[in-house]
Amino acid sequence: MCMRIEVLIILGSVLLTACGGGSSGGGSTDLPGTGTSTPILSGTVTVGITDGPMEEAQTLVLNLTHIDFGRDDGDVSRIVFADGSKRLDMMRLQNGVSENLIDHASLPAGLYRWMELGIDLEQSDLELQSGGHHQMQLADPEAMRIQEMFEINAGEHGDFIIDFDLRRSIQHHDMGGMMGERYELHAGMRLTRADQAGSLSGTIHMSLVDAYQSDCDENAGGNWAYLYPGEALEPDDLAETETDGIPGPIATDRVELDAKTGEYQYHFSYMPAGMYRVAFSCSSEWDEAGDTDYPNDPEGRFHFQVFGDPVEIKAGQMSEYHLSH
């Protein structure tokens, strides 16, 4: 019995292989013993990708090969990129900039539980600000999978954005001695419907940034904004495994000085409509995704300067929220 559905995009055409044959748009499958057929229902999807910043990276080139879509019934649909792969420098996809991986590709209608990016790690490369180049390894086989339920309706179109949070996804491990350094890709992506998303931007008062805070290191890399659900009672760090019972941030963004306005700014894009809270830290270089650094950092270096009130993000709109003492 055939249990796997594959959708292949090859040289711009779409080929659907399914039990019983037929095409994804107007094809059909035979009903056993009846001599009649039923149509294979499908919709279309566009999937774009954007990136959250990573202070240590100069470039991050990902060589992506396909997207797998995991259906609720256990079948998997695969869309392979027309040229065999897509090479993306993720550092160029920040502050609301995105790039489509697929555009109006046909996909069987139904409920889906996850989406997973296929990656060729040998053709992917991380270049650090220091100039070093490193290949990456998957922390686990499902590190490139987004566990998020969504539905594709027959005859309708779904427009999705993948937010690849590099700071959360890429973790550095010093293996010591001859083992050298290891960079691992961890699960750190979220999926949003583009038509249900909005953005949030704002400024951080200059008195809060590291240059004006005696308990923060003035070296680059400390000023970051953290985004939390509106019901969060307090901010927390980037720990991969929550051990203190406090949810970590949904997203983070580097706070940078706008030379034209003289203001320190942050920006969160493609966030689902709803209520959120923003926190700011000028010591964020000490917040490592693989560790619990707050509120019980043994060295006491990581902390937050301010935690804002709830603010609403509306679909299709840019909201503003400014942080001060």
Image (cartoon, rainbow, N blue to C red):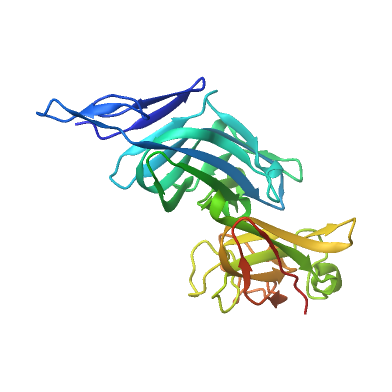
In the displayed structure, would residue 307 be above or below residue 49? below
In this rendering, does residue 121 appear at all?
Answer: no
How far from the left and from the top, in percent, is residue 70?
Answer: 37, 43
Question: In the image shown, does 60 or 5 lie closer to the viewer?
Answer: 5
Is residue 74 left or right of 133 when viewed as pictured?
A: left
x, y percent for residue 285 = 71, 62
Taking depth in this image into account, of 143 and 276 the one nearest to the observer is 276
Query: Which of 205/282 is in front?
Result: 205
Name the quadrant of the C terminus.
bottom right
Q: Position of residue 86 (x, y in %)?
A: 58, 31
Whether residue 36 can be seen here: yes
Q: Position of residue 301 (x, y in %)?
A: 70, 72
Query: Seen in the image, is 105 located left or right of residue 23?
Result: right
User: On the rendered structure, is 5 left or right of 290?
Assistant: left
> On the image, which quarter does residue 63 sit in?
top right
Residue placed farthest to the top in the image?
Answer: 11
Name the residue: 31% across, 39% down: 75
